[in-house]
Every structure is written in C-alpha cells, then in structure tokens.
Image: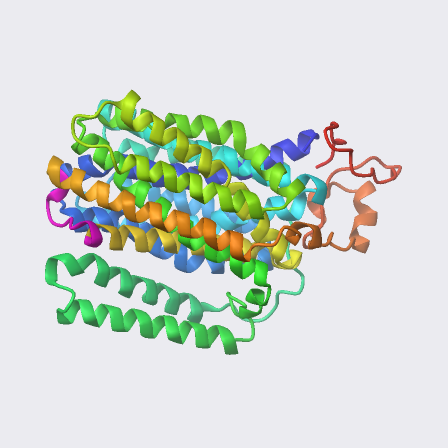
Amino acid sequence: MGSARGRWVLATAVLGSAVAFLEATVVNVALPEIGRDLDADLAGLQWTINGYLITLASLILLGGSLGDRYGRRRIFEIGVVWFVAASALCAVAPSIEVLVAARVVQGVGGALLTPGSLAIIEATFHRDDRGRAIGAWSALTGVGAAIGPLVGGYLIDDVSWRAIFLINIPLGAFVVWASRRHIPETRDPTMTGKLDIRGSVLATIGLAGITFALIQGPGHGMGSPMVIGGLLVGFAALAAFLHTERVAEQPMLPLSIFSSRQFTSANLVTFVVYAALGAVFFLLVVFLQVALGYSAIEAGAATLPTTALMLLLSPSAGALAQRIGPRLPLTVGPLVVAAGMFMLSTVGIGDGYVESVLPAIIVFGLGLTLVVAPVTITVLAAADPRQAGVASGVNNAVARTAGLIAVAVLPLIAGLSGDDYENPQAIADGFQIGMQVSAVLAAAGGILAFATIANDVLEQAKEPERKPCQEAIDQVPARHCAVAGTPLATRPRAPAPRPTAAPAGSTPAPRA
C-alpha cells in the first residue's frame, strides 16, 4: 500500500470496477427520463436494470474462472473493452427493447471485469495490507457508484440520458492503458480442462426465467400460463445448473468452495443485505424525482452524504474487521442500515430534504460502511487463495442476484405496475412499503451475521506459499512472473529481509 506500484494497482482496479458500479447507479437516476423518451412502462424500466443484472449475475462466476485460468489482468481488460463497446450501443438505442438488449450485452462485460478487479488485489498485495487495500477498494468504488447519480443527473438535465453511457468510453480507455502498464499478471496454474459453458447457459436461463415471471406477474397475473411457465423453466434450469456443477470436470462454480462454513455464511449475509440495498437503489432516486419533485441532478446530489461516508470510513472499517474480526461490524452494520431504511419509509410527499431525507441517508451510509469492506474481506479470507477469482465471482454473483430479485419482486410487493412510476402518490406509497420490507431484510442480515460469522476467520487465512518463480523477480520486471495468489512487486537486486508486521498504530512498511 505504501509503494507507487501498489497505488497504481489499486487505482486501476478501483477505476475499472467503478466504471461498472457508476453505470448501475447512473441508470437508476435516468429511469424516469428513459421511460418518457422511449415510451416505456414500469416493466420496461425494470428490464433496463435487470437485463444487465441477469448476464452479470449468471456469468460473473465464469468471469472469475476465466481470470484464474487465462490471467486476471487479461480478462479484466477484455471486460473493460466489452463493457465500453456495449455502452456505446446503449447510447444510440432507438427503443426500450434495443436498450434492454444492449444492457444484456453490457452485463457480459461487467461479468468479466468485476471479479478480476478484486482478484487482482487479493493476488497482488501482501497479506498484511490486503485488509486496507480491500477497504480502500470498497470505499473508492462505492464513491464511484455514489457519484454516479450526481454526474448522471447533470448529464440527464443538461445533455441527454444517452450521455450517461458515453462517459464510459474515455474512462475505459484509461483503465486499459493503466492496466497494461502497471498491473502484474497472475493466474491459477492448476486450472485446466474445458470451460463450463453449459453451466453458464443454464445459470442465465434460470435467472432469466424467474426474473421474467416476477416482472410480468403484476400485469398478467401470477397464475397466468406465461408466468407459471417462466417460473418452471427458471427453476428447472437452476436445478440442472447445480447438477452440472456437481459432475463437471472443471465447474465454473466448484461446489466444494461452500465446504467452508464461513464462506457460505458470508455469502448468505451478502444475499440478504444486498437484496435490501437493491430495493433502495432502485426506488430512492425515482421516489425523489416523481414524488418529491426533485430534478435529476438534485436526486443525484441527495445521496452525496453516503459518498462522503464511504470515502472516509470504509478503509477504517476494513482495517477494523482485520483487527477485531468481522462479526461485530457485520452485525452492527446491517442493523444500522435497517434503521436508515426505516427512517426513509417515513418520508412522504411534501417533506423537506434536511429534516427528513438527510438524516436517513446519513444513518444508511454509516451502516453501509460497516458492511461492504468487512463482508468482502471475510469472503476472500475464507476461500483458498488459488480460487481468488472464483471466490470474488461467487460473492459478486450473490450480490447481483440479490439485487436482481429485489428489483423484480419489490414492485410486486409494493403494488406498483404499468405507468405508476409517473404517479407521485403511487410511488410514495410503494416507496414506503418497499423501505419497510428492506429494513426487515437488512436487520435479518445483521442477525444472521451474529449467529454464523466467526471472529477468527481472518486469522485462519494462510499466506500463499512462495513459488520458485519469485527468485527471478530480482532480475526481471514483476509483470513477467505469473504466479497464482503470490504478492508481486519489482524488488531491488539484493534480496532484503522480509519486514515483520508493523505494531498497531504505526506506519506500515511500504510494500505492494
């Protein structure tokens, strides 16, 4: 963390992930304008979000496996290029159907770049610095996601909703340049055999079938043949997916990874809490614009306190979890998030920002800082270092699937459908119900963490074994050494003794 190379690796990984995370939050702000411009109903707006999440959630495991097999940096860069190209297609979409199709393609790029970002950090940084690095990654990518509504609001109000997709082009170009120049390549040499294409297809069909049924249910009735058929196809495909992963020679989701109780527990907490978060991110900016009359940029600016809190506190939350264990942060964090959501559920038409919205946003942001970095650190520490890409992919897939289900189910629970997104009272009523349901989910996540997360999970994570290839690092640049899970950095020709861990409160020795 103290070296220039380490800072470049972190900055590049953060910016690559931020491109994807920023896009997700920007699109939420643009939903009312997209609906008016493309004459879309609520189902069309749900598909604008979920079309992206379906391919992201179902292929992110494959993206992690591809990184472990062919090189994490290489797959990360391919994902960035793919994402940017799909963003250009979104920008020129003439109809809601074309936009949804482009968003589906965009999700493929997100599935390639997102797990690679975290896996690069896990495989590159020294164990003593990983907690801080992941905390900084969580904070800065969270900032990118939170800045998205503000940037998107400005572009929507002053240019067009289409401009929110075009900003990815220069950002993506810079990420690829920085990655080629500063990130060392790492991979898992044990990854051999055929790719699990069948598993990827089944996972996509399963999530798409269930999502289709849940989104179409309010308009056609949950008992209609279309909805029942979608559910049957979805659940059958997911069952076939689990069977395929059990018997495949090289599954994209090795079920053995769940033999770690802590890995499974951390992902269960992720699913519950991120389902609640997905509801907030989907409904909040729409509620602010439609029910409270905010402009797009005002709705985006309303979430800036969360940005500031994530920037200031997430690195400390990661370090705290590393020092005292993740159980307390992962218990308190979701409960504080739940309190913020419950406060949001009391906001109604005519309420002011400072006295009603702002306090809830601050409480929500404080809780969020105690969740993101600790749960990420726990997931990666509980998995074999050689499976860093798969572990990151599983956790991301769980989070995105939770958001996918929340966006599909929440309007059904809240009684929203058709053109209700243009009705202030309907949106206000649905928002209040949605926040109450989300608060219950978030609180359940905190209780689940208290019951299942162990404080010593980070201490049990073993340092990756040093490989013979490291002996050549003194003679060649680090980027030429591809070792799975091995911290890499350009070192002096005369090997120096490895520094011991710095005492608590002292400045850590510079290392990548």
Where is residue 358 drawn, in percent x and y?
33, 25
Colour setting = rainbow
Residue at (79, 44) in percent of width and height:
473
Q: What's the magenta region?
A: 412-422
**Quadrant where the C terminus is found in the figure:** top right
Q: Nearer the viewer, residue 46 or 7?
A: 46
| Residue 38 in view, yes or no | no
Image spot of residue 330 (x, y percent)? 52, 46
Query: Residue at image x 56%, y 53%?
Result: 379
The reply to whether the magenta stretch includes residue 363 is no
Residue 62 seen in this snapshot: yes
> Which quadrant: the N terminus?
top right
Along the viewing direction, whichever of 272 and 400 lies nearer the viewer: 272
424 lies above or below 226:
above
Residue 346 in the image, given as x and y percentages of width and height: 25, 35
Looking at the image, residue 86 sits to the left or right of residue 316; the answer is left
Please name the residue shown 58% across and 40% down the image: 134
Q: Quick one: 479 or 258, which is closer to the camera?
A: 258
309 above or below 449? above
On the rendered structure, is 123 left or right of 175?
right
Residue at position x 34%, y 49% from top?
440
Residue 4, located in which quarter of the rendered image? top right
Residue 70 vertical position relative to residue 202 in the rendered view, above or below: above
Taking depth in this image into account, of 392 and 414 the one nearest to the observer is: 414
> In the visual, does 167 lie left or right of 501?
left
Is 416 inside the magenta-drawn segment?
A: yes
Q: How many marks?
A: 0
Residue 195 drawn at (x, y percent) = 51, 67
**Taking 424 as reference, is 183 left or right?**
right
